Image (cartoon, rainbow, N blue to C red):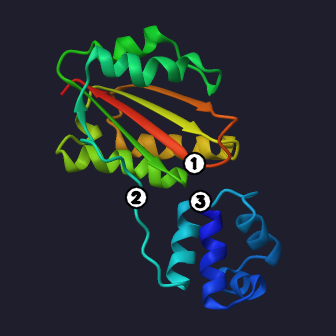
Amino acid sequence: MNDLVKKWRLEAGITQVELADKLFMTPQGVSLIENGKRTIQYPLLQKIAKIFKKELIFYIQDEPVVKELTEEIFQKEMIPSFQTPGVVPADEEDLRNIISIEGKSYFTKANGILLNEALFGALHHFNEENKPLKNAKGVIFWIEGGTSFTFDDLDYVSDIIAKHTNKNADLVFGSTINVEEKRGFVVKVIASGY
């Protein structure tokens, strides 16, 4: 997405100083964004897109977005995630406690260049399938990010998760950093007890 900001700016024929003025930030801040040294939070991306009259899209996979959870999906999608050293670790027992809650369990994942794209993409998947997370009795959120993933991102995500889940639901949150990935995020969600 950082490359896209630079592309949009150059297409519009404006300088970093001019873009910085429109965003009420310093030219150095614009430079950090364009060079991939600063994570763009969604509200800032919305402002940038509006300046350049661009539409934002979510990056989602080309398969069914919400699937009933099976052991095969759990083994393929979750086991490798929590066996990788992470910023916020979880263990298999915690995850299995959530998926053993009475009722059906569902899985989705969403990818995005920005954390918000992946996070809100996953939330959107559940809402589109008429399975809002507020109705789940247990929820697992797992976030995989590149080296631009920060503790501020974790705080932001935890606030969003709290707003979209039932306050009485069991919640497991974990994250891993993929050191080979400079940017981009994957959000995996299991919701149980429907």
Question: Residue 126's mark?
Answer: none
* 3 or 2: tag closer to the N-terminus: 3
Tag in front: 3 or 2: 2
Tell me where residue 55 sits by quadrant: bottom left
At 52% from the left edge and 24% from the top edge, which residue is drawn? 81
- Alpha-carbon distance for marks 2 and 1? 12 Å
145 shown above or below 85: below
Quadrant of the drawing holding the C terminus: top left
Left of 68 or right of it: where is 24? right
Left of 9 or right of it: where is 15? right
Tell me where residue 13 sits by quadrant: bottom right
Q: Residue furthest right?
A: 28
At 28% from the left edge and 12% from the top edge, which residue is drawn? 100
Expressed as whole percent of the image width and height from the top left, the position of residue 117 reads 46, 55
Expressed as whole percent of the image width and height from the top left, the position of residue 154 reads 60, 40
* 2 or 1: tag closer to the N-terminus: 2
Expressed as whole percent of the image width and height from the top left, the position of residue 131 reads 20, 40
Expressed as whole percent of the image width and height from the top left, the position of residue 90 reads 54, 18
Tag in front: 3 or 1: 1
Give the number of marks: 3
In front: 120, or 57? 57
- Alpha-carbon distance for marks 3 and 1? 13 Å
The residue labelled by disc 2 is 58
Question: Residue 184's mark?
Answer: 1
Left of 77 or right of it: where is 30? right
